[in-house]
Image (tube, rainbow, N blue to C red):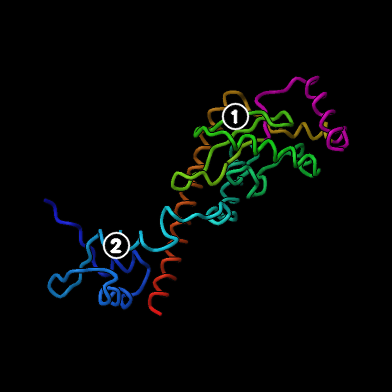
Amino acid sequence: MTMEELITINQLKDILQVDRLTVYRMLKDGRIRGVKVGRQWRVPRSEVTELVKGLPGLGPEIELRPSEILPVHCLQVIQDVFAEMVGVGSLTTDDSGEPLTFVSNPCEFCSLILEQPSGRAACVASWRKLARSQTDEPEFTTCHAGLQYARAPIEQNGRRVGIQFAGQFNFGEPDETEEGHRVAELADAHGIDQEKLSRAAKSIHRLQPSDRARVGRWLARVAETFEIIAVERADLIGRLESIANLSNFEN
């Protein structure tokens, strides 16, 4: 039979993010049970676990919107570095494909399309379509404008809260005739000057087919980094709510 782990008052106040006086009050009024070892209080780990479970808004039960647990200002900086380093455009959306960040390292071709309401709607539709995929691995596809996109899911405690995209690129040089037809169709569909869009097509990010694995690998790493941020932010919000609940108990 193994002895249950006991934690100190200092450890308990750090876990609950409260002061020592609050911990002693909790011991005195029975909200948490402890034992005295000599002159020092010790609290069984199971007591802390049960207390945390019983606090509303803490742990897996918390349901926060993606925008609440994915700090856009922080994600934007990391995403910008990733996009410029790999040589692609990048975007973070919520789990439905709705943008949370601005596009990082955008090419002029895609920027012209996104400036038009119908063009942006078509891009968002492409993001939403790819967001619906349930695979856990980075997945490549072709968007409405004929460019390559890849996505990796962002999860928080097993719940998908966002999608990380790498896009606005092609593998290798496109067929000039096919690209000309595609540019003409896009220009007509979204009211863009065809000559201007044709010139902008030269700004499309070009990667080699051998870069496919590299893009997928880096995309997965960025998504994993954002998952860590999401989990820690949700935990922080839960701790703040637990402090508020403990304050209510005092009143």
Q: Amino acid at mark 2?
A: Val
Q: Nearer the viewer, residue 80 or 95?
A: 95
Instruction: Name above or below for residue 125 compared with residue 15.
Output: above
Q: Say if the magenta span includes residue 241.
A: no
Mark 1 or 2, closer to the camera: 2
At a point 66% along the width and 30% down the height, the residue shown is 148
> Along the line of sight, which residue is nearer the eye, 129 or 200?
129
Magenta span = 168-196
Q: Which mark is residue 48?
A: 2
Does 177 lie within the magenta span?
yes
- Decide: is 219 above or below 17: above
- x and y percentages locating residue 237 in the rendered image: 47, 61
Q: Going 65% across and 47% down the picture, which residue do you hit?
A: 99
Quarter residue 215 falls in:
top right
Q: CA distance from mark 1 to mark 2?
A: 45 Å
Element at badge 1?
strand
Q: Split into 4 quadrants, where in the image is the C terminus?
A: bottom left
Residue drawn 31% across the image and 75% down it: 20
Left or right of 99 on screen, residue 13: left
Which labelled disc corresponds to residue 217? Answer: none
Q: Circle 1 sits on which residue?
A: 140
User: Number of marks in the image?
Assistant: 2
